[in-house]
Image (tube, grey):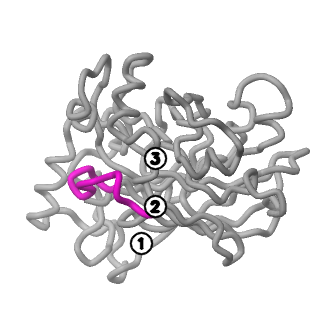
Amino acid sequence: MKLLRVGPPGEERPAVLDDTGRPRDLRSLLGQEADLDGAFFASGQMARVANALLRNELPLLREDTAPGALGGRIGAPVARPGKVVCIGLNYRDHAEETGADLPAEPIIFMKAPNTVVGPNDEVLIPRGSVKTDWEVELAVVIGKTARYLDSHEAALSCVAGYAISNDVSEREFQLERGGQWDKGKSCETFNPLGPWLVTADEVPDPQNLGLRLWVNGEARQNGGTKNMIFGVAEVVRYLSQFMVLEPGDVINTGTPAGVALGMPDQPYLRSGDVMELEIDGLGRQRQTVGQA
């Protein structure tokens, strides 16, 4: 299934795409206060949604929505994630382009949950920034509590699904201003997510996905999850040794080569630039860059 949220900021309604690409209203099934949040994933409602979709029991979110149309703004497919955990330098080619040694263990940093915005929302360059950068990433959404997992199989059983993430970063704030990486990662709008969450059953091998990003129509990143140093299963297992992962948490799993940081002659983002991102089977994003 492809789960998504449609509507203005703060007013998004949870939905699922039908086989014509139109969003079907989930609140008709789950209640008027329901959302794609931690409570939804923890309650095991995805099977109920899948059955209702199969039986054609869900009304269209908007009756005038044409096949293939979404009928409005798309929000992030996860409402109010409890935390956004990120893995740094997790692609061999990205580590090489930045001159970093391959990590012996996953590098972990956190991103403020309120950085998460819709997949096509405006991305704001922070005030004083001259090094705002792009990063296409595979996002993992946790579907059930994960603590002290002892195998890759157990780790994958905790994954609800996958989405595209743009781990926007301010490199001067991150690397030249002291402190932790979080400083360059948690600026407002710095985590476009979506357009939808593709459930784990539709992604049989998360280590066989292509990732691509363009800036102003020019290709910047073109990689594959097979090039991860630590795969999805290991990332989830490893994180569970240090923190409890809860339903609705988001994990950004790293980015391939092609970021501005790794290319000295490549300009960083400026107001008016357009980023486009895609991952095989997970859809596409498009953001225009503005100024905070």
Depth check: give the residue in front, 287 or 267. Answer: 267
Q: Which residue is mark 2?
A: 195
Is disc 3 surrounded by few (<14), some (14 to 19) or many (20+) residues within 10 Å? many
Identity of the residue furthest to the bottom in this view: 66
Disc 1 crowd, CA 10 A, few/some/many (<14, 14-19, 20+): many
Towards the viewer: 268 or 19 = 268
**Is disc 1 in contact with disc 2, using a CB cutoff of under 8 Å?**
yes
Relative horizontal placement of residue 247, taking residue 227 as reference (left or right): left
Residue 153 appears at what percent x and percent y?
20, 34
- Residue at point 68% right, 30% down? 182
Residue 9 seen in the figure: no
Q: Position of residue 237 (x, y in %)?
A: 34, 27
Task: Give the Cα distance between marks 1 and 2.
Answer: 10 Å
The quarter of the picture where the N terminus appears is bottom left
Q: Which residues are magenta?
A: 198-210
Q: Which mark is residue 228?
A: 3
Q: What kind of element bears circle 1?
A: loop
